[in-house]
Image (cartoon, rainbow, N blue to C red):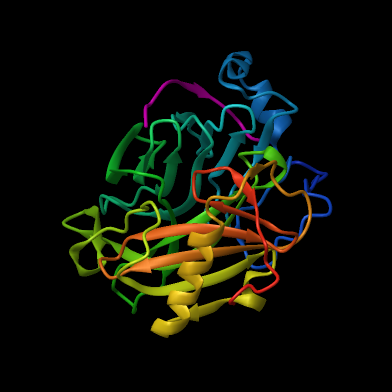
Amino acid sequence: MKFIKTAAVTLIAAVLLLLVCSCGTDKSGYMTNRLTKDGVSEFLQSDPELSKFGFTEKATYNVTPEGLGGITLFKSADTAYTAAVYPGYSYSFLDMSNAPGMISAVTCDADGNGITDILFTYSDKTAHKYGIGVFNGVLGYSSSVFSAEGDLALYLVRQKAEEGEPDIFSVLAVTVTVFNDNPADLGCTAIQNVGTVTLKDNRPVFNADSGEKVNIVDIKYDDIAKIIISSLPNATEHDKTVVDKADIGKIADYVKNIKTAEEETPPQTGTTYILAFVYEDGAVAYAYVNENGYFKLHGENWRKADISDMPF
């Protein structure tokens, strides 16, 4: 994260809302942010220098999630930079280049001073970093709440607290789908809860479940606690958790047997199943199987696969 530049900006309410959708893409089963062109023209007119950071008429989208009040978030599909606009103040860049950049955002009062902060999750795939940050555009600061190395992606979900108590934010480990090769258009599928963010001593603190963070690892075939099987795009209809040791063994053997098949180009059609291998130590390994006869391990290329006797 890096505070790059500020400049005065006034947002004019747009009369016409243009909803930008991934035509033909079913996003059911995903957690997604809003994706529109609302306010983009006014934002770009505020400063010609914005184009240097990938903010152009074609590439810029309003990705403001629900519940951010008057704060607006714009994201570039070219650079994955995110700009936060506070009404009446200034805009500031959240320096999270390299797709997918910012993944989720919620508001909080991190310092207890009545000023709205943005608590957000991010992922920088080039540098293999992910984490949680807090940003305040009024005072002009940003800081890290939690950061780590690896390919894990995180997502924040607000949990309303009892009256008089601060809200708690669940932190989910998720898989991220980039729709239409557009890092502003993200869909997330939750794998498990990895912790919470609470406000303590006037600052946000990440609390990992069991004191451990979840790591994405290369697939191994021992010590598998469970296998979570989801499908895209209708994950809610097909989620299945396998805990029987015999069934886990069958699936692990299936993956092992087709791992050496010849490499292929990515499948263009058909349902793709996500297999999350959750190990006893909390680590997760991923495999993907497409119903049209394709298979891949996380971070590797697609291969041809015989799915006629798929054990799930």
Q: Which residues are magenta?
A: 1-11
Tell me the quarter of the picture where residue 188 sits: bottom right
Q: Main secondary structure of the magenta part?
A: loop
Residue 2: say if magenta: yes
Among the 4 quarters of the image, the one containing residue 39: top right
Closer to the camera in the image, 81 or 114: 81
In this orientation, does residue 41 appear?
Answer: yes
Name the residue: 62% across, 40% down.
Answer: 184
Q: Position of residue 106 (x, y in %)?
A: 45, 55
The residue nearer to you, when weighing 59 against 136, is 59
Indicate the position of residue 239 as horizontal and vertical percent values: 58, 76
**Residue 225 at what x, y percent from top left?**
34, 75
Which one is nearer the viewer's eye here, 307 or 81? 307
On the image, the x and y values in percent for residue 171 come to 38, 62
Which residue is drawn at the image coordinates 58% and 58% (left, top)? 288
Residue at image position (68%, 38%) is 181
Please determine whether, in this image, residue 240 is positioned above or below residue 189: below
The C terminus appears in which quarter of the rendering?
bottom right
Is 285 on the left or on the right of 45, as rendered? left
| Residue 196 lies in the magenta-colored region | no
Counting labels gives 0
> Is residue 13 something one can see in this rendering?
no
